Amino acid sequence: MQGIATLADVRTLEEGAHDLPPSTYAMIGRAVAAHPRAPALSFFARVQDHAQPLTWDYASLWHGIHATANFFHSLGVGKDDVIAFALPNLPQTHLVIWGGQAAGIVFAINPLLEPATIAELLKAGGAKVLVTLAPLPGADLWPRLQAVLAEVPTLQHVVLVDPRPQAGLAATPPNAAPDGEGRITVHDFATGVAAQPGDRLLSQRVIAPQDLSSFFCTGGTTGSPKIAMRTHANEVANAWSVGQGIGEGIGPGKTLFCGLPMFHVNAVLITGLLPFSRGAHVLLGTPQGWRGEGVIARFWEIVAQHRVHFFSGVPTVYAALLQQPVDGHDLSSLEYGLCGAAPMPQELIRGVQARCGLKILEGYGLTEGTCVSTVNPPRGEPRPGSIGLRVPLQEMKAVRLDEAGRYLGDCGPGEVGLLLIRGPNVFRGYMVAEHNEGLWIQAGEGPPWLNTGDLGRCDADGYFYLTGRKKELIIRGGHNIDPAVIEEPLHQHAAVQLAAAIGRPDAHAGELPVAYVQLRPGAQAQEDELLDFVRERIGERAAVPKAIRIVAEMPLTGVGKIFKPALKLRETEDALREALQAAGICALGVQARQDPARGMCAEVSLAPGTDPAVARAVLGRFPQAIDFIQP
């Protein structure tokens, strides 16, 4: 099948669904049996070396997965033990993920977080093993982590990955244990794996579908973080569903480029388990992925050289790629690009398709749903603004709730409501019980539904549209930022009475974090002073606010809560005015509003004689819908 085109195709696939593998290990194993000598994984460390990547076929990948699982087993890892990894995009990262899931539970951690934040996550997740980067020139992750790992009481082993031997360079032997007492043992990944057999699992473990496979962080990373617990059945179902939906776009003979970081669910599932389950080839481009030096600038050259068919990116990636010349590069292999971490402006979609001939498949997903919940079908005409059809096996609907959160009924076609999902891809829940409060809703007969926290509608043909995010996450270039990460440090300042962080629309990043502050009566502080104060206390660099704005009074709701939509409207209007002024376009007025059906949108009054097409080109890369008015 050439992928879904209608809701009827989704239902047909569901009727034929049977015999799903019981685990991610078994799912990859089926592809290995069918395509043992096909290329599975390629890697280049520097963009200038991309034409000569290191390549592993499926048999070699399978050998590495077995040896890695056996190494973890030798460290005492069982099915309920947690193996955390804080690594860049390396071939070893894939071995840790899939070998780790065959041995225990794999916990993905962003290596760019501050060491204290990583230690907090390790404690919250109960990590027994941490796999991280060995000390390298220009990489200080391990030296910084050494100072805090003794604070993690469950941690028994640290495994260091040194990628230099693959480049013909000498590795650095592991140094002393980070706790200074020998409670934590340090190992070299390559040495440990080389000592293990790669033809079988020594543990002889039978992995059940409901066994936990992975932990991923979602929401904040301070205090008690939200850790999503997912099962093998979740990951298998979602990989199968997306694969069936896209059809032959991912399979033997197809090459996928991985540029998103592998602590992110998209990179792990869409450019990991999905292609590995279907005999496709994954091209891993530099340890930093899209952020690697020269990757964006030479991406069309990479596509032409390796005949790339598919890749995933966030809107900022597509915007940057659109600025790169395509002349002289054969891009005829390109079929699809997936975008789902943040809303992608329609003007940007049209620009990419016109410039590169690349079909953009916009989708929607969340960590709690494993990765993908909806995607625009590869066949048929795209529907502007839509996040697509639900994936096979997963149900999705918009519902009406009363003020107490009780289910009133399903929404009709075009009616905006709270989006709910349920199905085999929906996770088990958060590790901390309190985080699950209000998460599940009994909305009719059958099992409860997952409350996505997002608002949307569904048309008569089954296409969904996001109209607002009930959750207050700020999405910066696909990076989810919990406002509390910014607000909590601000509240530590003696002069701050109230703080509210929101996302400011941005043509490049989608949103940038901005914080509003109301000072205590009689207190004094400058915006720059507050920015310096909070910068030192935020563990995520992406979460450092672009600006802090001191206001005399915060907008409040009738019950005294900060009314963030008013702040969001203010930032939207200011961002649009600033973009128009920078382009030399005169606007008589900009008014933003929250439309029940369209979400955040704006009305722009243009000065007489202004060409609306020019203004539309300037504002077309903002995610908001724009209406232009001329006198």
Image (spheres, rainbow, N blue to C red):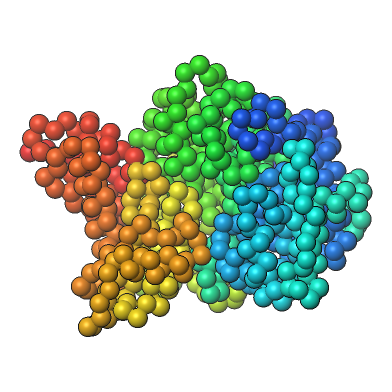
Q: Is residue 472 left or right of residue 599?
A: right
Is residue 357 something that shows in the picture?
A: yes
* The one of 403 and 23 positioned closer to us in this rendering: 23
Question: In the rendered image of this protein, does residue 378 appear above or below residue 14?
Answer: above
Q: Which residue extends farthest bottom?
A: 522
Quadrant assignment for the N terminus: top right
Quarter of image, res 80: bottom right
Return the x and y of residue 81 as percentages of the image width and height. 77, 67
* Residue shown at the point (55%, 77%) measured from the top left: 434
Question: In the rendered image of this protein, does residue 93 appear above or below residue 217?
Answer: above
* The one of 582 and 2 positioned closer to us in this rendering: 582
Quarter of image, res 430: bottom right
Return the x and y of residue 210 as percentages of the image width and height. 73, 61
Return the x and y of residue 350 as percentages of the image width and height. 38, 31
* Residue shown at the point (46%, 33%) measured from the top left: 321
Quadrant assignment for the C terminus: top left
* The one of 151 and 501 positioned closer to us in this rendering: 151
Question: In the rendered image of this protein, does residue 82 appear above or below residue 511?
Answer: below
Q: Which residue extends farthest top?
A: 328
Q: Is residue 606 left or right of residue 347?
A: left
* Residue shown at the point (45%, 67%) measured from the top left: 536
Return the x and y of residue 318 as percentages of the image width and height. 45, 37
* Residue shown at the point (20%, 73%) measured from the top left: 552
Quarter of image, res 77: bottom right
